[in-house]
Image: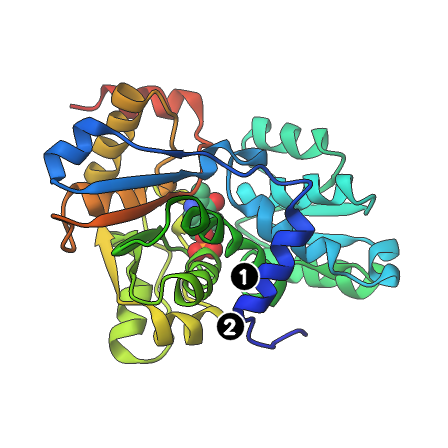
């Protein structure tokens, strides 16, 4: 198992690997918002990244860095969300066979999208089987390489390229707000921010109902929690990673939380004022800024919008919620 802590040099190497395949996603602003907050807010729009989320960056970098023998044998990932799509598309582009372990009752659209990227889907029963055990059995029996969603140096380095681009494009920032699940995106972002904008205060933002990251930072060790309930389905992880936590502990200013109603208001703002679909998890950082959970007035602020993949019928309900 690869357990070396990544550095900013790895982010720079990942940006070369990704330069011809990942989109350099746009940075958008809103004058309405800037006036309201008396601040300058820059949104890095990874909802416009390939597969609709930043996870393409880390997934592609991880598959691209495998040895020739590992690539020949194929990869496996367990996820019903953006990581699955990322590994499926990255593998297709790199001519690697991908197996995705998904619950038997995963949304049909997600399964179809994964198969559409050329991956094989292996189903398991959520009530009687453990997805990690199912994936590990494939590793053992078929020699596949498991690509974890966040706790892997090449995944972290790839995720860090989004904030590297943001800082190259807009220059120095006073603060930066990043959605937080298992911490791959936040730890990669911290490597880039520390190297390119060392004075910038970087905050991770997680759902209030699943504040394991906040508890971990406050107590100095990884705290794991029971499965939380939130519409931020990309951030329902039970604990930070062995690689992501040390980086977060060293460089993050703080970890903040927002609740589901604040996420819904943020989604409505993006739809109405900026004409963008942002998924609930993608709104975590923005919701912290909109509600001024940390100081924002008079600042230059970066906000990472991490993804835009949301079930349309659920999205319709979110937009209609008063
Ligand atoms: C996976 C994901 C996150 C959380 O990323 P981590 O690296 O697990 O912290 C945030 N937003 C979206 C859209 C995601 O898919």
Q: Residue at x 46, y 66 (%)?
A: 191
The answer to whether residue 117 of the structure is visible from this angle is yes
- The answer to whether 234 is drawn above or below residue 248 in the figure is above
Chain-order first, disc 1 or disc 2:
1
Dot 2: what SS?
Answer: loop
Mark linked to residue 243: 2
Residue 230: x and y in percent read 31, 45
In screen coordinates, is 199 left or right of 63? Answer: left
Dot 1: what SS?
Answer: helix
Q: Are marks 1 and 2 in contact (CB under 8 Å)?
A: yes
The answer to whether residue 103 of the structure is visible from this angle is no
In screen coordinates, is 302 left or right of 168? Answer: left
Closer to us: 30 or 142: 30
Q: Residue at x 53, y 60 (%)?
A: 150
Q: CA distance from mark 1 to mark 2?
A: 9 Å
Closer to us: 175 or 71: 175
Q: Badge 2, how many Cα within 10 Å: few under 14, some, many 20+?
A: many
- The answer to whether 46 is drawn above or below residue 109 in the figure is below
In this figure, which residue is indicated by the disc labeled 1? 156
Residue 178: x and y in percent read 35, 52
Q: Quadrant of residue 322?
A: top left
Specify whether tag 1 is near ligand 1 (CB below 8 Å): no
Closer to us: 115 or 48: 48
Residue 44: x and y in percent read 40, 41
Specify whether tag 2 is near ligand 1 (CB below 8 Å): no
Residue 292: x and y in percent read 14, 48
Q: Residue at x 83, y 55 (%)?
A: 71
Which is closer to the viewer, label 1 or label 2? 1
Q: Residue at x 25, y 21 (%)?
A: 273
Q: Badge 1, how many Cα within 10 Å: few under 14, some, many 20+?
A: many
């Amino acid at each position: 198992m690869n357990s070396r802590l990544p550095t900013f040099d790895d982010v720079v190497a990942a940006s070369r690997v990704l330069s011809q395949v990942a989109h350099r996603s746009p940075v958008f602003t809103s004058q309405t918002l800037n006036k309201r907050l008396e601040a300058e807010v820059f949104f890095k729009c990874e909802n416009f990244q390939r597969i609709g989320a930043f996870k393409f960056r880390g997934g592609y970098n991880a598959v691209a860095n495998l040895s020739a023998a590992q690539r020949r044998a194929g990869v496996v990932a367990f996820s019903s969300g953006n990581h699955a799509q990322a590994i499926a598309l990255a593998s297709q582009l790199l001519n690697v066979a991908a197996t995705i372990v998904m619950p038997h009752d995963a949304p049909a659209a997600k399964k179809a999208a994964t198969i559409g990227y050329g991956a094989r889907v292996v189903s398991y029963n959520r009530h009687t089987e453990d997805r990690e055990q199912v994936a590990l059995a494939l590793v053992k029996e078929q020699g596949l390489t498991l690509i974890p969603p966040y706790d892997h140096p090449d995944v972290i380095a790839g995720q860090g390229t989004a904030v590297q681009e943001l800082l190259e494009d807009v220059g120095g920032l006073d603060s930066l707000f990043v959605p937080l699940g298992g911490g791959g995106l936040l730890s990669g972002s911290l490597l880039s921010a520390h190297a390119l904008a060392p004075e910038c205060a970087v905050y991770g933002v997680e759902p209030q109902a699943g504040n394991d990251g906040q508890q971990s930072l406050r107590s100095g060790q990884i705290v794991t929690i029971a499965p939380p309930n939130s519409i931020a389905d990309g951030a329902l992880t039970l604990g930070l990673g062995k690689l992501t936590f040390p980086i977060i502990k060293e460089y993050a200013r703080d970890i903040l939380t927002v609740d589901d109603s604040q996420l819904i208001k943020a989604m409505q703002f993006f739809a109405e004022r900026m004409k963008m679909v942002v998924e609930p998890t993608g709104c975590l950082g923005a919701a912290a800024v909109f509600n001024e959970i940390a100081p924002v007035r008079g600042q230059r602020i970066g906000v990472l919008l991490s993804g835009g993949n949301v079930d349309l019928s659920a999205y319709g309900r979110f937009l209609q919620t008063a």
